[in-house]
Amino acid sequence: MARQTSRATIERKTRLDGSVSEYRCEALSLEVGRHAVLRYVMDSDWVIADTGIVLRPGQITIAHYWIDRPYNVYHWLDGSRTIAYYCNIATDTAIDADMVSYTDLVIDVLLRPTGETIVLDEEELPPDLAPARRIHIARALETIASGPRRLAAEIERETRAVLAA
């Protein structure tokens, strides 16, 4: 059963090179071992390469995580206006009471509200990436590409629901 909360939760992203980044977020909805929705307020500019998007301080990310999907989704908002949906291809997602963690598999997919889909960072994949990881990435990209508007609509609904709670 989902539990609404407003307590601090850490997002831990582990990169393929083993480096780790942690972000202090607000848990909006947390279902241990299944699904989480976190809120993060931008504290500095972040330029999303080759997209023309710049996230500014004060804009928010509503981050959606599932343990049974090969990606997570950042829903970027400026007030109530959607800027974009940013899908991180990921694996090993874990959702605990005080932390959401995942392994970032480099490739990201930007979904614009217009329906445009942009695959990012393919050139950053290590040449020696294990075949199983490459297959995981390909399947995740196929999943996102098969229904980007459906995914965006789902994220929009979930974001609005947790923000209204």
Image: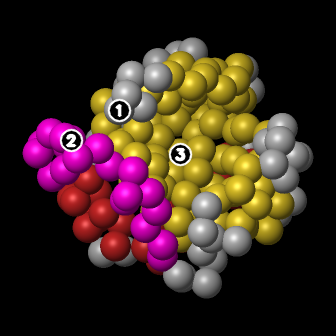
* Magenta span of residues: 117-135
Residue 151 in the image: state x and y as whole percent.
45, 66
Task: Tell which tag, 1 or 3, sits nearer the viewer.
Answer: 1
Q: Give the distance between the C-alpha atoms of the residues marked 1 and 2, in whole angstroms.
A: 9 Å
Q: Is residue 100 above or below residue 159?
A: above
What amino acid is found at the position of numbered circle 3 in the picture? His
Residue beneath disc 3: 64
Residue at mark 2: 129
Which quadrant of the view contains residue 34?
top left
Q: Mark 2 and mark 1 in contact (Cβ < 8 Å)? A: yes
Which label is found at residue 87?
none
User: Taking 119 as reference, is 152 left or right?
Assistant: right
The residue under label 2 is which amino acid type? Leu
**Of all residues shown, which one is farthest toward the front?**
127
In the rendered image, the vertical position of residue 140 relative to residue 114, given as above or below: above
Which residue is the site of mark 1? Answer: 16
Q: Earlier in the sequence, mark 1 or mark 2?
A: 1
